[in-house]
Image (cartoon, rainbow, N blue to C red):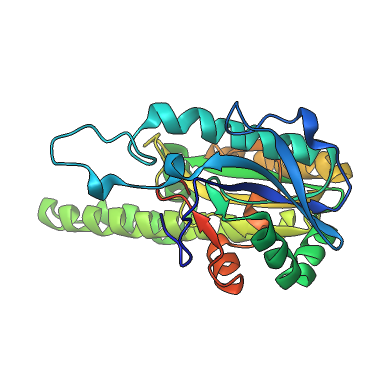
Amino acid sequence: MQTKTALNGERCLYLYGVVASHSIEPNRLRTVEDASGVFLVHASNLACVASSVRVADYRDQSQDIPPNQPKNQLGNCLEWLAPRVMRHHEMIRNLHEITTVVPFKFGTLCASASQAQEILQQLRQPLTRLLGHFDGREEWGVRVVVDQAATMRSIEEMAPELIALRKSAAEQSPGEVYFLQKRRQKLAAALVQELVFSLSDNIEQRLEKCAVQIVRNASVAGERDKSKLAVLSAAILINRNRLESLEAILEQVESECSRYGLATELSGPWPPYSFSTDLHSFQNSASGEVAQASGAS
């Protein structure tokens, strides 16, 4: 358990997110634990969507487990973790469908309703601003890739530097040709990378025309298909009526960059996960009264 304030009781509150007070009737929403119902903790114009859970179920006690023994605690047991992560996600999506929500990460815990109310009071202004910012909007994931072979082929056909080196090689000795080829390969790789950066910036600028906000993912280097090069991976916050504009921009980009084998992938709609207050900032500004279950971020 990563927290500044220990959860010492038998039960605590599991927090899903913040909504406008009295904006929903939560009775029919499914919680992370079957035996617990969902309820609202009100404070002024805000409310935390919460349910009651056993502290022991969400506390990471792996350090107390003897060596070579099975570890069933949170973060070490996918069988326990997976259905609860799914239920958390379902709850946030259901909330997003019926109202505006500032979602919390899976495993966000609070010791009591009074502490949840205190947190809402402390963060009333930023949370109210976020609710206003998210109203009528949704998150979409955008991923753009190019085909590595097609991009390299296009670069070799179009780049004057590479064309000049290829012509020069025809007039050189075999030994000199070898070094020219190495030079061409290095230059071609650099030009491909330069093109990818240029495409990434250009596409983001075009997406800004229909987006309220864009957040790039931390890394796009982990492309599983080695024949593809990742160009852009980002979360986009848009007004619900702007989806067609977003799709039109991506279709135009694909058409203009077909020589690179460029393909786009659009996923969503999602609640505004990528644009919500960071949990660590939330913890710090709430005096450590919110905890996050270890391994559940």
Position of residue 121 measured from the top left corner of the image (x, y, whole percent): 75, 69
Residue at the spot x=45%, y=61% of the render? Answer: 6
Classify residue 81 by image quadrant: top left
Residue 267 appears in the rendering: yes
Q: Is residue 204 visible?
A: no
Q: Quadrant of the N terminus?
A: bottom left
Quick one: 146 or 189, which is closer to the camera?
146
132 to 74, vertically: above or below: below
Percent coordinates x, y for residue 254 in the rendering:
66, 39
In the image, 19 versus 38, the foreground residue is 38
* Image side of residue 166 versus residue 172, left or right: right
Specify the farthest residue to the front: 9
Location of residue 271 by image quarter: top right
Left or right side of 3 for 172: left
**Image-based side of 138 in relation to 65, left or right:** right
Query: Does 241 appear above or below 213?
Result: above
Q: Position of residue 130 (x, y in %)?
A: 77, 62
Q: Nearer the viewer, residue 204 or 69?
A: 69
* Image coords of residue 71 (percent x, y): 27, 36
Give left or right: position of 273 versus 11. right
Q: Count all numbered tags in the image, as a single digit.
A: 0
Above or below, 119 against 49 in this view is below
Q: Residue at x 34, y 60 (%)?
A: 187
